[in-house]
């Protein structure tokens, strides 16, 4: 059965991960710009990174029949320096017309600081101006609920419609608000902590399968590029119908991502 991993950071994964994902049925991925594990010290560092996301990774993924797409931004973890963030934002339009770019992301908040909020608003303004879709990161642990509400208000203030915005890293205490306000929701699967495949399936059983997807957010840290197929196995173990499994891991990502003209299935 085919699946899509709509949030995975392949710049920090090996070619062998691409192979294993393809063997497990992955046919498409989307890769948001994220924090490299260190703060980049120049705008040129971001330009190189955006070239890696728009040129290098699509070619690497295509070797395994996986269609690669990307989202561009300066990640909230690097957004404390508003002046620097403005410089990075100024080069993003150079890349927005690349054939695999879906929109702006993953933007959002990390510590819910004023500077982060200002940089979030700058990104949302750019998205509105260029009619881009948006992928949103929400803070972890105790900052998540407050941060999610702040982000949804900022999206509304920017004049973006919620059905073109996906709010990622939802958990039990945020998914209801996100769906109620008309946004799409993403569940990031972690191996042991936060949202495990078991918790994600519990969430689906409680909140349903409309406007929701799951992803691995695999990166350089503790993460699992095969998390989505593992969650599918958990759904099968609980005897959920194949149509439901396919909807959450394949149909829903296609429905949301197809709102960008750049989304396609064949690499
Ligand atoms: Zn994130």
Image (cartoon, rainbow, N blue to C red):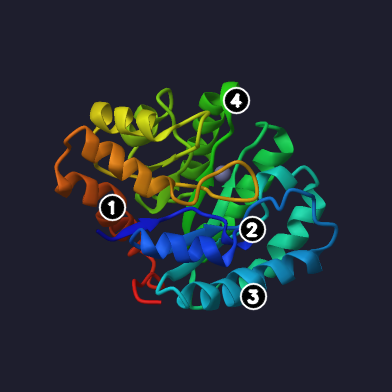
The mark lying in front, picked from 2 and 1, is 2
Per the image, the residue denoted by label 1 is: 252
Q: Nearer the viewer, residue 238 or 163?
A: 238
Q: Are marks 1 and 4 in contact (CB under 8 Å)?
A: no
Q: Are marks 2 and 1 in contact (CB under 8 Å)?
A: no
Per the image, the residue denoted by label 4 is: 143
Location of residue 142 with respect to 104 vertically, above or below: above
Q: Nearer the viewer, residue 264 or 12?
A: 12
Mark nearer the N terminus (2 vs 1): 2
Disc 3 is placed on an element classified as: helix
The percent position of residue 72, horizontal first and vertical second, equals: 59, 61
Per the image, the residue denoted by label 2 is: 12
Q: In the visual, does 10 lie left or right of 209? A: right
Q: Residue furthest right?
A: 41
The mark lying in front, picked from 1 and 4, is 1
The mark lying in front, picked from 4 and 3, is 4
Per the image, the residue denoted by label 3 is: 94
Q: Crowdedness of circle 3 by 10 Å Cα count: few (<14), some, many (20+)?
A: few
Q: Quadrant of residue 241?
A: top left
Q: Are marks 4 and 3 in contact (CB under 8 Å)?
A: no
Disc 1 is placed on an element classified as: helix
Q: Nearer the viewer, residue 254 or 236?
A: 236
Q: Quadrant of residue 84?
A: bottom right
Mark nearer the N terminus (2 vs 3): 2
- Ligand 1 position by quadrant: top right
Mark nearer the N terminus (3 vs 1): 3
The percent position of residue 13, horizontal first and vertical second, equals: 60, 59
């Amino acid at each position: 059965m085919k699946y899509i991993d709509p949030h995975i950071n392949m710049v920090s994964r090996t070619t062998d991960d691409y192979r294993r994902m393809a063997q497990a049925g992955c046919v498409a991925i989307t890769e948001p710009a994220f924090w490299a594990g260190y703060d980049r010290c120049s705008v040129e560092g971001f330009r190189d990174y955006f070239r890696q996301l728009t040129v290098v990774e699509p070619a690497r993924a295509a070797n395994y029949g996986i269609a690669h797409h990307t989202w561009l931004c300066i990640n909230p973890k690097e957004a404390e320096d508003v002046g620097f963030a403005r410089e990075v934002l100024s080069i993003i339009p150079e890349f927005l017309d690349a054939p695999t770019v879906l929109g702006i992301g993953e933007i959002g908040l990390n510590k819910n600081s004023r500077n982060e909020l200002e940089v979030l608003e700058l990104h949302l303004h750019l998205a509105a101006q260029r009619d881009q879709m948006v992928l949103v990161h929400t803070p972890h642990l105790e900052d998540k609920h407050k941060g999610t509400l702040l982000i949804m208000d900022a999206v509304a203030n920017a004049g973006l419609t919620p059905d073109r915005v996906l709010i990622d890293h939802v958990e039990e205490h945020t998914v209801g608000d996100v769906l109620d306000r008309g946004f799409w929701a993403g569940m990031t699967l972690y191996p042991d902590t936060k949202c495990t495949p078991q918790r994600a399936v519990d969430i689906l059983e409680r909140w349903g399968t409309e406007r929701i997807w799951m992803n691995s957010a695999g990166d350089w840290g503790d993460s699992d590029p095969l998390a989505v197929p593992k969650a599918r196995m958990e759904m099968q173990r609980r005897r959920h119908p194949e149509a439901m499994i396919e909807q959450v891991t394949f149909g829903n990502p296609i429905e949301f991502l197809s709102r960008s003209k750049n989304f396609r299935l064949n690499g």
